[in-house]
Image (tube, grey):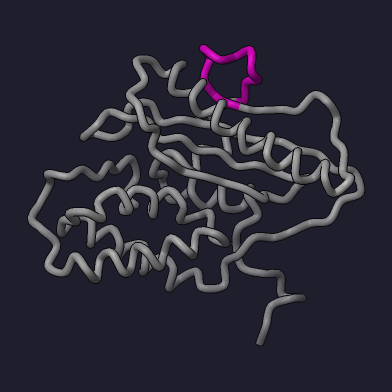
Amino acid sequence: MVTRAHLNSDDGVLCYDPTLYRSIVGALQNLTFTRPDIEYAINQVYQFMHQPLDCHFKTVKRILRYLRGTLNYGLDIHGGSIPSLLIYSDADWAGCPSTRCSTTGFCLFLGSTMVSWSSKKQATVSHSSAKAEYRDVAHSVAELDWLMSLLSELGISFPSLLMVLCDNISVLNVSYVPTHDQLADFFTKSLSSDRFHSLCSNLEIGDPPASIAGG
């Protein structure tokens, strides 16, 4: 998506083929299970499934062009002897121009491997950035708690103190991370090309190493 672009429901004419729009976006949703780099963009266009406009379809076509140029992208998975859990949490306060709801985003790491991520519009309007961030942290911690319970059943234990990182000064007591280092930005806003590709690298998203690439 274009940097800092925000889609809305009253900017343009109706899409010429709403059924095709829904079919493509529905299929792309399945792709986000292995392509976190399109999670935010798909979350945005999915919000207009009921009445897509031509501008929304143009965004979908832009996503398809991006995917055509990154067909080999995937997640690098690394092994490690000492298990650890770390979660980056972020919220785009009042980012939706139609509802003023915020977008929640997080990415959860098991060791150095990202194993869970999400980009989702919050159900209620937050009256401050701190409230939006706290709602986001609560959503992130719920995912963290679920994963810890699952791993505990498998006999894998973790330190009692786990880290949740956010970039809002109002929630500094959670644990502050500079905005430049906030990996969850990936799931809450459209980014410049340089920032987008930088986060792809930090999240281990890209072409496979030559040693394992097919061909």
* Horizontal side, residue 195 vs residue 159: left or right: left
Quadrant holding the C terminus: bottom right
Magenta span contains residue 11: no
Q: Position of residue 56 (x, y in %)?
A: 23, 56
Q: Quadrant of residue 124?
A: top left
The residue depicted at 38 percent of the width and 38 percent of the height is 121
* 140 relative to 208, above or below: above
The residue depicted at 40 percent of the width and 35 percent of the height is 103
Q: Quadrant of residue 28?
A: bottom left
* 32 relative to 159, above or below: below
Please state the total of marks drawn on the protein image.
0
The residue depicted at 34 percent of the width and 48 percent of the height is 44
* Horizontal side, residue 60 vs residue 91: left or right: left
The residue depicted at 67 percent of the width and 49 percent of the height is 114
* 97 relative to 61, above or below: above
Q: Position of residue 139 (x, y in %)?
A: 54, 32
**Which residue is situated farthest in the front direction here?**
153
Q: Position of residue 5 (x, y in %)?
A: 29, 43
Q: Position of residue 203 (x, y in %)?
A: 63, 49
Q: Is residue 180 visible?
A: no
Q: Main secondary structure of the magenta part?
A: loop
**Which residue is situated farthest in the left direction here?**
13
Of the pair 99 and 38, the residue shown nearer to us: 99
Magenta span contains residue 170: yes
* Horizontal side, residue 20 vs residue 184: left or right: left
* Horizontal side, residue 135 vs residue 154: left or right: left
**Which residue is situated farthest in the bottom direction here?**
215
Of the pair 71 and 94, the residue shown nearer to us: 94
The magenta region covers 166-177
* 147 relative to 69, above or below: above
Q: Is residue 201 visible?
A: yes
